[in-house]
Amino acid sequence: MRINIRQVAVCTVMAVVCGSRAPAQERFALPIFNAAAPEEMGVSRVTAGCSAAEDAFLVGVRGSLWVLDGLQVFGELDSMTWDRRGVGPTIQVGGAYTLPLDISADLAVRGAVYKPFADGDRDMAGATICCVVGRDLEAFVPGVSVYGSAGFDWRWGTVDLPDGRSASEDDFSPTLGIGAQWRINDILSAWFEAALDDRLFGGIGMGMSF
């Protein structure tokens, strides 16, 4: 396997930018989008990987199935170690549809519901929906793809108060995100992802797809 110096330089810069500006990747271990993902009905994929940020480390596995051309459903299980809220799993299920447009980029709609268990003081769940635009940069930097996303995140549940009572908590916020992936070979990839909803978070990671 030959390693292109431009690939290493681009991914190093992306990793430094993400790691220096993003205080924590709070929810998911795996990237939300892959511009080089299969599009045909019946294709399945298993992706496993890990990501790290300033005060969090996550490992996760995702199973995806393309039920129609361009339409995938997925389920993901992550385990998170977070300095401020302990250790616990997060589950996520959802779907993504890549629109059949004759343009030089991939335009997709992605939605998911998720449930974290890492914080003992909060019993929360959430849902997110976003539009994602991705572009494979194969002509410029082999193996690298980039994307941006915009959408909404809604979290709800209860929070335990110091006096022993519980209070409901509901948060609806717009989200923005950027990400990039370097396909080192047909199986191994490295990525970074950063997003902003009610706070900035991000992480860098590496994983395998089969």
Image (cartoon, grey):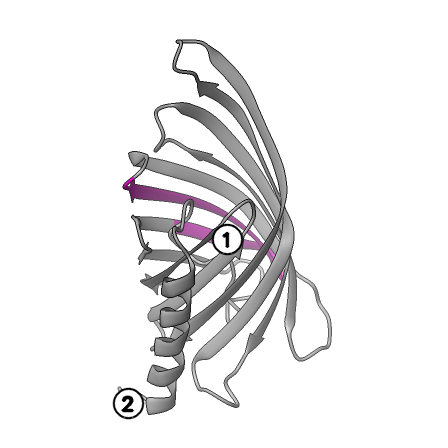
Q: Which residues are magenta?
A: 62-83
Give the residue displayed 50% in from the left and 41% down from the top: 93
> Which residue is label 1 attached to?
65
Look at label 1 and name its amino acid: Leu
Give SS at disc 1: strand
Instruction: List the single residue furthest toward the top.
Output: 164
Vertical comparison of 6 with 172: above or below: below
Classify mark 1: residues with Cα within 10 Å, few (<14), some (14-19) or many (20+). many
- Residue pointed to by mark 2: 2
Q: Residue 105 placed where, x, y %?
A: 64, 75
| Front position in the image: 140 or 11 | 11
Q: Above or below — where is 106 with respect to 130?
A: below
Residue 207 figure quarter: bottom left
The structure residue drawn at horizontal position 37% and vertical position 42%, both measured from the top left corner, is 77
Give the prevailing secondary structure in the magenta stretch. strand
Locate residue 208 relative to residue 115 in the image: left or right.
left
Q: Label 2, secondary structure: give it.
A: loop
| Three-letter amino acid code of the residue under disc 2 | Arg
Q: Are marks 1 and 2 in contact (CB under 8 Å)?
A: no
User: Is residue 77 rendered to the left or right of residue 179?
Assistant: left
Distance from the alpha carbon under mark 1 to that under mark 2: 31 Å
